[in-house]
Image: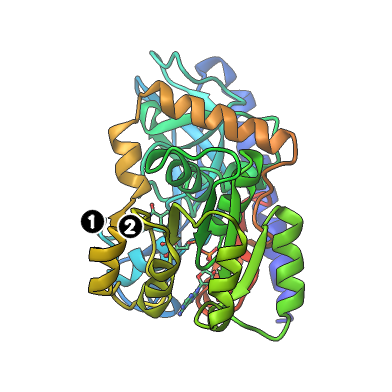
Amino acid sequence: MNSALNISLKSFSRRLLRHDNYYFVCRHALRRSFSDIQSISVVYSEYGDPNKVLKSEQKVINGPLKSGEVLVKMMMAPVNPSDINMIEGSYFLKPPLPAIVGNEGVAEVMEVGADVQALKAGDWVIPNQAGFGTWRTHAVAKSMDLKRICNDIPPLSAATIAVNPCTAYRMLKDFVSLKPGDVVMQNSANSAVGQSVIQIAKAWDVRTVNIVRDRENLDELVEQLKSMGADHVVTEEFSRKPAMKDLIKSLGKPPKLAFNGVGGKSATELLRHLGQKGIMVTYGGMSRQPVIVPTGVFIFKEVSCIGYWNSQWNYENAESLERDKMFDELCQMIRECRLLPPPSEIYNLDNYAQAVESAMSGFQGKKKVLTMEDF
Ligand SMILES: NC(=O)c1ccc[n+]([C@@H]2O[C@H](COP(=O)([O-])OP(=O)(O)OC[C@H]3O[C@@H](n4cnc5c(N)ncnc54)[C@H](OP(=O)(O)O)[C@@H]3O)[C@@H](O)[C@H]2O)c1
């Protein structure tokens, strides 16, 4: 069958199902329960190549909710490198299998059970911790596993706020006390984390030196990052030339802080350009190469190398006021259009396989994001 026709028939039959559910919910409204919601999830039963081990599964969800439970409908969920690594079995967290894919995303609360005070129908929520399984249409979850998020921002921003902007925010705040005019540098500057670093640093008057991999449309990428507030954008190749030293000199003060999302040679170059007693924070390892620190850099520059993991920070700060303050600040930046979501390509949940395949090839330029709007 023609694939476009096939997709539209599928979504038509789902709409019918949804209509039937709605009818059923209305007829039984007095029982304050829901019945026969078809929840579709993307699951894996073994670790392996994400292009091979994923499949779609349908499950019927029935009420009533137990005390403390919440029924949510997922709205959007990104395809992040941590999702890919989790499916491969190479991530630090290994969920028990079978597992539903997806660590990040935004959902709308449809119904709450008894004793749920913090949430109400219509609220938008994000998972409190990694491993929630966001690549699905509906979920019944414990209210304490969800965090309410502002619902006056674009769904795409809400779906992508929890991992990358929070990582950027914490890395800019927790390791060095940055003052206006200070300089930070980073590799994989065009990643979603990198773009958040650029925008938050700009909002705080901190200058950024940004390193990206060379590509055909480099000028376009440089322009895009500069329009977000990047002060300098250079290629990995440039960062290894003497001209990079001149660029750093021209800043008036050397970078105090560097963010490494790549590892390998790229991380070593960052270290060479850090100032005395500078700190390099490693948060990602996209090259899959180890971080090698030249001995002289350790001794004579007295640099420190440290790691950051957002999931651990969330675990330690689940109820902290600092976490609420961070989300308030990030939501405000989003409202003021000072923090934009990464340029994205939206895929219907049905098309998760294409989204995954595309996310796994480099030089993509756009975050792949799944939408559950049609379910
Ligand atoms: N520690 C934490 O808490 C934390 C939180 C968030 C993210 N992360 C990690 O941060 C990294 C970026 O995540 P993201 O969501 O921002 O990614 P993303 O938006 O999907 O971007 C991926 C980035 O990786 C680069 N890249 C891909 N393959 C590469 C390779 N072989 N060598 C060098 N660079 C490569 C891409 O550059 P091109 O455009 O040149 O391909 C792009 O800049 C991932 O490793 C992720 O797991 C960690």
Q: From the image, which quarter does the N terminus lie in?
A: bottom right
In the picture shown, does residue 203 fall above or below 362?
above
| Tag 2–tag 1 contact (CB < 8 Å) | yes
> What's under tag 1, amino acid-wise?
Pro
How far from the left and from the top, in percent, is residue 151? 65, 30
How far from the left and from the top, in percent, is residue 229? 70, 52
Work out whether residue 239 or residue 95 is closer to the camera in this orientation and state it.
239
Residue 75 visible in the snapshot: no
Number of residues whose C-alpha sits closer than 10 Å to that of mark 2, classed few (under 14), some (14–19) or many (20 or more): many
SS type, badge 2? strand
Give the residue pinned by disc 1. 96
In the picture shown, does residue 266 fall above or below 17?
below
Work out whether residue 104 or residue 73 is closer to the camera in this orientation and state it.
104
Number of residues whose C-alpha sits closer than 10 Å to that of mark 1, classed few (under 14), some (14–19) or many (20 or more): few
How far from the left and from the top, in percent, is residue 280? 37, 58
Give the residue pinned by disc 2. 99
Q: How is the image coloured?
A: rainbow
Q: Would residue 59 appear left or right of 312 to someone viewing this image?
A: right
How far from the left and from the top, in percent, is residue 22? 65, 34
Q: Residue at x 53, y 83 (%)?
A: 241
Q: Would residue 100 appear left or right of 134 to someone viewing this image?
A: left
SS type, badge 1? loop
Q: Residue at x 65, y 51 (%)?
A: 341
